[in-house]
Image (cartoon, rainbow, N blue to C red):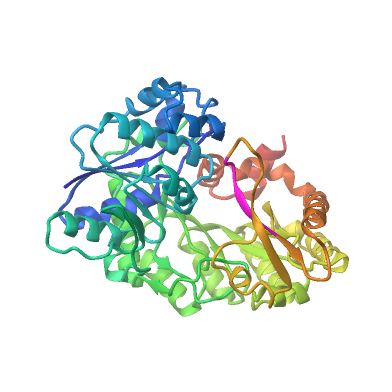
Amino acid sequence: MKIKLIYPPENNSVQSHLLPLGLGHIMGFLKSMGVYAEADDLHNKVIKNNLNLSKLSNLNEIQNYIIEKHNDFDEISKNILSLTNLNGFDLIGFSVTDQSQVNILLVLAKYIKKTLNSKILVGGSFSNNFEEFQNKYRLFDYIVLNEGELAFKDIIDNSLNTTNKLISNTIYYEKGSKRIGPSVETPINLKKMPNFDGLDMSLYTNDSLSKPIIPYQFIFGCPFNCNFCSGHAKLRYKSPKVVAEELSKLSKTYNSNYFYFLHNTLNFSDNYLKKVCEEILKLQLNLIWTDSIRPTLFDEDLIKLLYKSGCRKLTIGIDSGSDDLLERMNRLIKVSDVEKTVALLSKYNIWIHVNFMVGYILESKNDLELTYALIKRLERHLSTYTISKFMLLPNSNIYNNPLKHGIEILSKTKNSKDTNEYNEYAFDEINNLNWEQKKKQQEFAFKIISFALKKLDKYGLMNNLDQFYSLVDKYDNDRIKINKILFN
């Protein structure tokens, strides 16, 4: 079986400086099985070739194209797909990690079905958005809803007639009947080093960034159980020695020491994290890396070790300045933990990005005031930030037990009749705000917290990965020199 893996275009003109990790994981796995596979990034290629995708935003027109009421999108589909080679591949797999890719992929899938005999697979963090369209149009042969390694293995085994079992983590149709494979986590021994061979590395650099930023993941799943989160997979992790060896191979292969670690909780174990840093230092890799942590990092010796191993920025999910709200979220942290962690990271010159969530269930005026006050206490230590509005996620504790958490789920709503920009579940708070009131409350809270964080806007350039890595590298993380550039 010959397989082509593609990162489809997003509907924006922002160049990605990160190599596509989802493709890298599956490429690494397929190569370990001896399967012929190629990968391509159509997002950055579309930007390089100045293709205008603005027409691919109207969902009604896209659905009319799918049912062949018009063929207006044939030309743009042909132009996009001409940027890669699809001939001779048995399976074309798409990795979707951004909501804006959904509309575009619906169009591309229809065009592929019209012009090629290849089967089509879609996976990634937004793959569940295709299920409703699949029920109507059958554009995709496979929709992979969770980790993809075992799905590909089952598809390949079935194609070789060695098995005829249900395909793991996958929705598909067989002889006209809908099949749903078992939900299975990939064993850690099958989580191979990502492989980005075949990608044009120049697509990920620019005048500011001389080398690509390599995404890497060595911790999978999460041991915690936050009520709003839908990612409750079993915790699995690579050995510290394997982590360092893979980082060394990736750095040499793709000629870059810039790494972007992608974890929910890097510091699930201080002892494990210490060993990872020690193994990195043994190999003298000279990395620059970033990641995300829980605000429970209190060991100064460990923080010094993090910095020495190349850590230059950490993202902290703070969410709220209210201990009561954090408890109802089941975050298992206190505001005092946040303050202690932030102060220590700042002391050792690690840039800090913070995430806040507004409009959580039964969030009160007092909760909001406590969050505002916490920001004012912390702001001298912080650099960049993200604010999100609470959204009810399928398979979260709240979604699975709405009454227990004080809500009644009403329906799945869309932000617009004509687009598929995002989907969300509407809900009423029991004996409190209805859905319309809740949306207004979230808008108000967003404005308040945005105002509280306004002083950090001067660091806005550091939100751009190319600028962050290049400046930190060029000036050896000298904050005085970097700040002069940012503020002048």
- Taking 132 as reference, is 40 above or below it? above
Query: Which one is nearer the viewer's eye here, 58 or 360?
Result: 58
- Residue 369 in percent (x, y) is at 86, 64
Q: Quadrant of residue 392?
A: bottom right
Query: Which one is nearer the viewer's eye here, 479 or 377?
Result: 377
- Taking 288 as reference, is 78 above or below it? above
The answer to if 396 sits in the magenta stretch is no
Q: Quadrant of residue 380?
A: bottom right
Give the magenta-colored segment's residue range.
420-426
Residue 57 in view: no
- Residue 48 in percent (x, y) is at 43, 25
Quadrant (top left, top right, bottom left, bottom right) of the C terminus: top right
Residue 267 in view: yes
Q: Residue visible at 55% across and 33% down?
A: 60
Q: Residue visible at 42% across and 47% down?
A: 134
Q: Residue visible at 79% across and 48% down?
A: 455
Q: Residue furthest front?
A: 176
Q: Relative to residue 387, is residue 445 drawn left or right?
A: right
- Residue 119 in percent (x, y) is at 27, 43
- Taking 245 as reference, is 414 above or below it? above
- Residue 2 in percent (x, y) is at 18, 44
Numbered disc total: 0
Query: Which one is nearer the viewer's eye here, 154 or 268?
Result: 154
Q: Relative to residue 309, is residue 241 drawn left or right?
A: left
- Taking 75 as reference, is 349 above or below it? below
